[in-house]
Image (tube, rainbow, N blue to C red):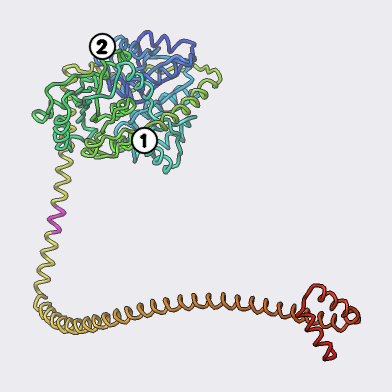
Amino acid sequence: MRSSFYCYGDEVSISVLESADEKVLLLGSDFGYGNFGDIAQMLNTISFHKEMHRHRCVIVMAADAIGDAQFPEFVRQAYKADGVIFVSPQPLSLDDGGLPLSPIGMMRNVGVVHLYGGGFLNDKWGDFVLGVTEYFLSLLQPQIYVASGEQVTTPFEARVVEHIRTYRPVMFGVRDQLSYEWMTQAGFEPSFSFDDATEALQTLTASLPLQRGPGLFFHLNVSGYTNNVANMSGMPRELAALAGNYSRVTMLQAYSDRRIEVVDTRESMKDLERSFPFFDYQALELAQLAYRGWPRLANAVQGEIGYSCSYHVALWLQLAGVPCWLRGSNLFYQQKRRALQVDQDFEAFLCDPKLADHSTNLERRKEWLQRLKTAVMTAPRFSRNVDIPLSGVLPASAWKFKGNHVRQLQEQSNWAHQQSAVLAARVSEMEALTEAERQRAGNLLVQMQELESVSTIDRKRAQDALAEADRLHGQISGLVGKVTELGARTYSERKRADLAKEEVSRYHAQVLELTSLLEARNHHIFDLDHLRQAECDRAELAIAQTNQIIRSRTWRWTRFLRFTARVIRGDWPSVKASLRRFARGS
């Protein structure tokens, strides 16, 4: 069921809301409670819309966050917002508070509702923020609804997906991978926008300026939602290790909030008492720097590493080039650690600090901002007047500023009741566990009694079983001996077989080598036989030709001429041979 809220504003804000100008309504992590990261996200989102010069910016804060009569004017000036709406779940009686606020009776031409980012979509704060968002969406019916930079923590993703299906944002961006995975598994695939404080944090780095150099940055927070109190034993040890390595120290205070449940760095130092190891340090009030528009300091701020209990403090240092370790004592902060790529334990980080690489995230954010700008700027002009009922069914509550003595006592009482309720729940849980253990002990006693009644039979069976086990053990030992002997023989035979195989392989190689030599020699002999046969054929041909010449008439007719030529040459052996052949008649 959608929640109802009562809306209040100062004179300037009411005038802006009733004007004909188009307006964007901004709500998200910063409801006025003065947390550095939330302020940075709000300032950055306002700056984004201001740069488009289309819509006047109206921000939403909780009436419960107002600490003094000047607060409405202060936040409107500090955020450079055109108007501020303070919401309350019940009607307020403002007559005696001196607070310059009045009920808002009309809102005109609010064409865009932007739910900017933060880590509030979880079981602790999600229902309140989505309740306020859904109230304004139903009331104003804007032309465009967008969400950006969200961290969704399981099991709240089902509630977020239900909200998306009902109110249909044109764009829904998350700042980390786990939010993307959980929402996708729940049935809706979001976009990735990275963190909505990114550009403001980069501006702060340049304005201070912040540099990496000798020194340590540290931020502490032991508020209940961090779960660091339950793990407080580790923090003194970690701080002592840091104090032993760094003498130049900068303390970072993220909150500017007087609520007793907020336990930031200064308050944590008090809680730590003697365990707080630093005695010489400088301090930076980050919320005050944000409220004052990131003023430049006289001297640069530097540190080698950071130690933080705050997501945005860690992100700021990382974007500035300073490795920062983020404490994670519950699922909410472990999700933040993963988003910031803090995967080292404390000891590993202290030995070798790893700097996260957000270059891909920054590129994806540029793409997201361009798409968001296009969606806002290309929307047709919006015109709608909405009247807001001023009467309520609930009686008006007397207004008390945050920090008022009576209210402080009430807050302390509420806090004490909450702590008592937590302790009572733990006591009930322990009593339930004790009763369960008592029942288990009774059941065990009964079982022991039953076992005693059959112990004699079981003992006899056990003795018989032992005897049988001894007999089987003897047989097994014999078999083991035989198997061992057989294994040794098998090993020996295998060794011999391997040697024989090697010898055969060696002989085979020699045979192959001799075969190759024989084949080469056979080829050589074949070639010689071929040449010899060719020579014989040529000789026989020559003899035949000679015989043919000798038997020819020409040879006989020229015999006298050849003889005369030999005589003239003086070849007397040939002359004598010719005369002998003539004498023989040949």
- Mark toward the viewer: 2 or 1: 2
The reply to whether residue 66 is visible in this rendering is: yes
Identified by mark 2, the residue type is: Ala
Mark 2 neighbour class, 10 Å CA radius: few under 14, some 14 to 19, many 20 or more? few
Labelled pair 2, 1 in contact (Cβ < 8 Å): no
In this orientation, which residue lies closer to the viewer: 371 or 137?
371
Residue 438 on the magenta segment = yes
Residue at point 12% right, 71% down?
451
276 versus 156 height, above or below: above
520 versus 151 height, above or below: below
Q: Position of residue 457 (x, y in %)?
A: 11, 79
Give the secondary structure at mark 2: loop
Tell me how far mark 2 sits from mark 1, CA to CA: 39 Å
Identified by mark 1, the residue type is: Val
The quarter of the displayed image where residue 239 is located: top left
- Where does the magenta region start and end? 435-440
Mark 1 neighbour class, 10 Å CA radius: few under 14, some 14 to 19, many 20 or more? many
Residue at point 28% right, 31% down?
323
Give the quarter of the figure containing the C terminus.
bottom right
Q: Position of residue 68 (x, y in %)?
A: 24, 12
In this orientation, which residue lies closer to the viewer: 162 or 243?
243
Q: Position of residue 408 (x, y in %)?
A: 17, 21
Between discs 2 and 1, the one toward the N terminus: 1
In this orientation, which residue lies closer to the viewer: 413 or 146?
146
Residue linked to disc 1:
152
Q: Residue furthest bottom?
A: 584
The quarter of the displayed image where residue 224 is located: top left
Residue linked to disc 2:
298
